[in-house]
Amino acid sequence: MAIFTALAGTLLAGTFLAGSAIATTLVAAGLAIAAEIGVSYALKAIAGNANQLANQTDSFGVQLKLQAGGAVPRHFPLGRSSTAGQLVYANYHGGWSGSPNAFLTQVIKLSDLPRCRLVGIFVNGVRCTIPGGELAGVGQTVAIPEFFKDRDPNYPGSTADHLWVTYYDGTQTTADPYLVSDVSSVDRPYESTRVGKGCAYVIVRALSNNNLWTSAPQCLFETSSIPLYDPSKDSTAGGNGPQRHSDPSTWGGDSDDLTAVQIYNILRGIYYEGTWVYGLQNMTSARLPSSNWPVQIQKCRDAINGANGPEPTYRSGGQINVDTQPMNAIKTYLMACQGRIAEIAGFFKIHLGEPDSPVFSFTDADIVSIEPQVYRPFQTLFSSVNGIQARYPDPDQAWAYVPAPAYYRTDLEVRAGNRRLMATPQFDVVPYPGQAQRLQKSAILEGQRARSHTLVMPPAFWIYEPGDVGAWTSERNGYDAKLFRIDGAVDKANLDAGMTITEVDPSDFHWDPGEYNPVTGGPTINPRPAPQGVVDWFAEGTSLFDADAIARRPAIRLAWNGDQADVSGIQYEIRLKADNSPVTRGGTEELRAGAIIVQQGILPNTLYQARGRYIPSSPRDTLWSDWLDAKTPDVRLSMRDFDDALRAMINSVEQFKAEEIKAAMNLIAGALANVAATGWLDKRELRSELSATAGGANAKIAILQQAMVDANQAFANFQTEVTADFGEVHASVTEQASAIATLNGQAAAQWAVTVDVNGNVVGINLINGGSGTSEFSVVVDKFVAAFPGVPGGARVPVFTIANVGGVPKIVFRGDMYGDGSITVPKLNVAFLSAISANLGNIIAGTLGSASGRYLLDLDNERELISD
C-alpha cells in the first residue's frame, strides 16, 4: 500500500534557520515521484486553508495587557504561562471608614477552561507573595502582603491591608457572594446568575491609597496549565499510571508542562464536558501510536542539569487563543523541543530533541544506482547561520520578552569569511532561561549539518518513515556509519522508496551546565523613591509676647529644613509625655518658612513631645520623625488678660485706703524711731531678759515695756522676743503691740507677730488708723481657714491660699454664699446644667423645656404649656 509522508514542522525549517525540510520536493531527473511534503490531506486538516495560514499572524506565549470587551477570543493556558486576563466587571464601592468609594474591585477572567491554578501574581511590576504558595479551587481569598500601609502604631488598626485576591478555578456553581451583596450597585449590578461556569477568574479588591497606586492596579497572573492527558501515564495506552482519557478527573500533574504532552492534547482535541473547544476533532488514540508518543514524552521528562539543578529537558507554556490555527500552535510548541511531526497515512508521530538510535543501516551498494541522486554538500552563505540570540518570556522579569545571552561560534565565522551571520528567533512558549540557551546551541550545531541526499532505495527500505535514523557507510563519500535522518519519503510504483535524508549528530544536543550564562534581569517597575524623613526636625517650648514684650501665653515652636524638593508642607503631632495622650495635630503648607508656633491646647510648665513629617507634592511615602521633648515655660494668665473695667475694679480694691493705712503705719514707725530722743515729758521703760548659754547654743527671752508722753503725743509700746541659736542656725518669734495718739487728732494702733527661721520671715500685722483705715496682713507660704474636725478626725479646710509654682492660688470649698443668693454679678454663664435644682421663687423671666417650648413666661404672662 502507498505511504504518504510529511513533516509538519521543524526547529530549523521555515522558522529561524535557513533550509526548509518541509518544502523539500523529492524531484530528481527521470523520477516520477511527487511528494507534497507537509501538505497531505490529513495535514491540511491541521493547517487549515493554506492561503489564510500564509497571511495570518498568530500570537502565543504571554498576554501582558488587560483586555476588555466582547470581541476577545476565548483562551486557556497550555503549560505554565501568564496573562493579564480579560476584564469582565469593575466597580467602586464602600466598606472602609464610611467612604462610598474606598475600594475598587475588578473581576478578571484568566481562562475559558477550568482547573488551572494561580501560581504567581505581579502587581504594578512587583512580584507578590501568595500566602500558601498558590490559589486553587473555589473562592479562596488572600491578602497580598506586599501591599499594606504601615501607619502610626500608636493608633488602632496600624497595619491595613490594601490588596486582596480571590480565586475561582472554573468549577464554581454559584456567583461570588461578596460581588453580589457588597460590590454590586444600582448603576453596575452584579447578578447572582453571573457564575462564570467553566471559567477561571480572579477578584482583585484594592483599597484606595495614592501612595500605592494612582489608578487601577496593573496585575499580571501566572497560571498553571489546564490539566492535560498524558498517555505515558495511562497503563491502558502503552504507558504506566492511572490516567484515563475518558476520565478528565484523572488528568494533570507534572506532565502538564511537558511539550510533547501539550502537542498530543492539541492533536487529540481539547474538550469541555464533551464539547469540542480546540485542536483536531474526532482524533482517535490509534492515530497517535503508543509505540511513539510515550517514548518521546519521556525524552521531555528526562532530567538535565540546569542552572539550579536537574530540570526536565523540554518544557513549554503559553496562552492559546481558540482562533489560532492548530498547525501554527503545534509549530510554536515544536520549537520548544527541537521537534518534528510526521503524518504517515493518517498517523501522527513525533520526534524531538536528540536523534533516536538508528533503526537501519545501509551502504552505497544498497542504493538504486540507476535512479538519479541529488547531493547538497553545504549551504549557501545566505542560508548559513553562525550566531544566535533568541528572545523568550522571562518570569523573573514580569514575563517580558528578553534576549537570551547570545551564542557565537567564532570558528564558524572564520569559515564564513569572517562574517557573523546572526539569527534572532523568538521562543514564545519557552519561559525557561536554561532551556532557551540549550535551544540556541543545538540549533546552531544542527544547522551546520548541511549534507543532505535525495536518493532511491529498494523495496526493503519501504518500511522506514520520516524521523527514523539510519547509519550510512559510504566509501564514495567517506562516511563511516554516519547517521542520517529521513526527512521525507514517497513510494514509487515499483515499490522502491524515494527519500531525502539529512545528516545528524547526537553530540549537537549535549549540554554542560558550565555552558549556562546567568541572566541579568532588568527592572520590571519604575522604582519608587525611598520614604523621606524630616530633615533637622526640632521642637522647644516658647512664649507668645505682646507689644510690650511681655510673655502672655505658653507655646511650642517646631522647626525643620524647608529647602526640600517635591514637598508641599509639613504635618505635626503633639502629645503629653506623661501618658502619650494626643494633644493636637495639624500641618502647614508654608514649608519654606521652616518653623511654626503651636499654641492650641498647650498648657504652661508642661512637658510635651512633638514629631513631624513632610507632606509630599507627588504621591509617595514619608516618615515620621522621632518624638522630641519640649517643655513649655511657666507663663500664666495675668492682669493684662482682663478687660479695663475688671482691671480697674481689681486695682481699686488693691489700692483702697492704701495711703491712709501707710500714714498710720508711718506714725507708729516714727514714734518708735524717736523713743531714744530727749524731750519726753514723762517716760517709763521696763526691760527684763532670761538667757541660757552652753558652747555654741544660746536661748533668750527678752521683754520690753515702754510708756511715754510729751506735749504733742502719747505713745505706748510692748515687745517680746524669743530667740534660739545654735551655731549658724537661728530662730526667733517677735511680738509687738503699739498705740499712739497725737495733739492734732491722729491715732493709730498696731499689733504684729513675726516668725524668723534662718532669715525666712513670716508673720501677721494688724494696723488700725481709724474708721475705714484698718488692714490685716498675713505673710505666709500657705494660709488655711479650716473647720475643726469631729473628735478623732482631721480638720476640714474651707478656704486656702498657697504658693503653687511661684503663683498664688486660692481654693474655696463651700456650697452657699453668705447672703443666701447667687446674683447675676456673681454668676454669668451661657449654659448651666444641673442634675436637680430647687428654683425657689422666680421673680421674673422665662422657664422653658429642653425642646424649646415655653413652660412659663412671667414677663409676657404666658400660660403653662404641657409637653
Image: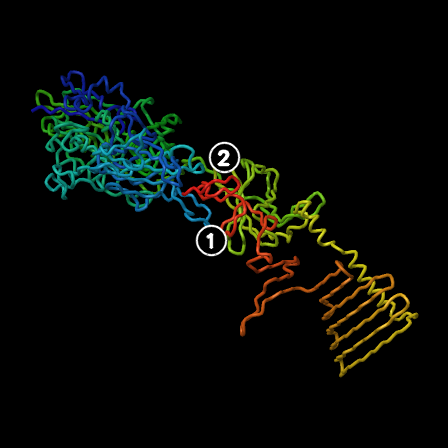
**Mark 2 residue type:** Ser
Residue shown at 47% from the left, 36% from the top: 619
From the viewer's perspective, is 471 left or right of 606? left
Q: Is the C-beta separation of discs 1 and 2 under 8 Å? A: no
Residue 526: percent from the left, percent from the top?
44, 35
Residue shown at 68% from the left, 49% from the top: 639
Instruction: Report whether residue 314 is seen.
Output: no
Q: Residues within 10 Å of mark 2 (few under 14, many from 20)?
A: few
Q: How far apart in space, not on screen, are marks 1 and 2 (Cα)?
A: 58 Å
Residue 753: percent from the left, percent from the top?
73, 69
Residue, disc 2? 618
Q: Is residue 160 above or below residue 408?
A: below
Q: Is residue 130 or residue 394 the one in the foreground?
A: 130
Residue, disc 1? 836
Q: Is residue 724 above or below residue 258?
A: below
Residue 655: percent from the left, percent from the top?
74, 54
**Mark 1 residue type:** Ser
From the viewer's perspective, is 125 left or right of 584? left
Nearer the N terminus, badge 1 or badge 2?
2
